[in-house]
Image (cartoon, grey):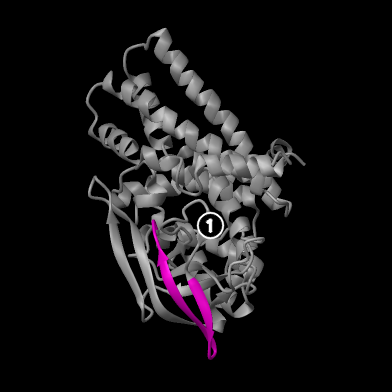
Amino acid sequence: MSSYDELTARAPELLKLRAQVRDFLRADRAEFGWKPAVDSWLGQWDEDFSARLGAAGFLGLTIPKRYGGHELGHLHRYVVTEELIATGAPVAAHWTADRQVAPGLLTYGSEEQRERLLPRIVAGTLHSSIGMSEHGAGSDLAAVQTRAVRDDGGWRLSGSKVWTSGAHHAHQIVVLARTSPLDTQHRHAGFSQFLVPCDADGVRIEPIVLMSGAHHFNEVLFEEVFVPDADVLGEVGNGWHQVTAELSFERSGPERILSTGPLLLAAIRALGAGPECDDRTAADVGDLLARLISLRQLSLSVASALTEGGDAANLAALVKDLGTSFETESVALISDLVETLPPDPELAAMSTTAWLHKPMFTLRGGTNEVLRGVVARGMGLR
């Protein structure tokens, strides 16, 4: 069944869910006063909001009921995610746990790990970060140098991770580390994943502050950190396969096409409230919306593939490449539109954030050059 056919079949329940999320967001914003933000899934950390979202039933949608979840499909989660990102809601606190950690636990985690962590993800009270990138091993994760060596009852983890979003707030970091020596003929072999508490002995978190003064990223150092066997995620040596599957969730969601959505939608509303815009402006806005609609259809096809249990790695890489290119290119055009409108502090603040974050769009989650290599390999071209 295509994403369009599945959406059509499920339209009544998805429309009802979308309306419920919108009602929640309107009421929550009115009561608690948060402001819509560009890139809200990166920088808008609000643990109380995440807990309220969980209590309202909008987290853990694909998690089975026996772990406290709602046992719905990826399209249900897509609808909720789309509304949250388009609104610019402060979702960063629960984001990584709900988007990446939960699917990893369901697919590879032990029953003890699932029972311990999944109910907290559903409640919006587990705050997690992901430790993948390193100095000299950004998009090339096969070059990761962080190592874990066997110790009595567990492992000793040593190394560092960089650009670790939210680690200074998080409860845990999911760390990719090498657990066997490098085989130059099989560079992707010998990796494992570990669930590491941020307050464990030997974990040191150093801030990476943006030019704007914002603190989203961190360098995390691991100095002989003991990780018990119970906190190995999945199978030892299977880390590369697990991370690749995890990246399908990271690269394909609405956040890869809608990080600048609150700015675009606010600018369109402001244009609509002002004098009639000229033909060039109307054409530019129409082009942006047409591209956004096309990208949304592609992103939805990934959600459908995940629903059917398929391998969405190549499609996800394509969504991320095209989506973040669109976001990058749209920032300048939207900013030019904003300059023609009456002063609006909220719109101006979002425009400034979009400019500051623009260089990150095509880097985080894998550079566009690397992603194109993934797509080419999937097509048998390399």
Whether residue 212 sits left or right of residue 101 in the image: it is left
Residue 210: x, y in percent? 27, 49
Relative to 113, is 333 above or below?
A: above
Residue at point 63%, 78% (across, down) = 111
Relative to 5, is 78 above or below?
A: below
User: Extreme bottom residue here?
Assistant: 152
Residue type, mark 1 in image: Leu
Q: Is residue 21 visible?
A: yes
Give the dominant element type of the magenta stretch: helix, strand or loop: strand
Please name whichever residue, 235 or 286, is drawn nearer the observer in this view of the structure.
235
Q: Can you identify the residue that label 1 sits on? A: 141
Circle 1: element type: helix
Question: Does the magenta-highlighted stretch encompass residue 197?
Answer: no
Span colored in magenta = 147-163
Residue 245: x, y in percent? 63, 57
User: Extreme top residue here?
Assistant: 279
Residue at point 48%, 31% (across, down) = 326
Q: Is residue 12 visible?
A: no
Q: Quadrant of residue 376?
A: top right
Residue at point 39%, 25% (across, down) = 268
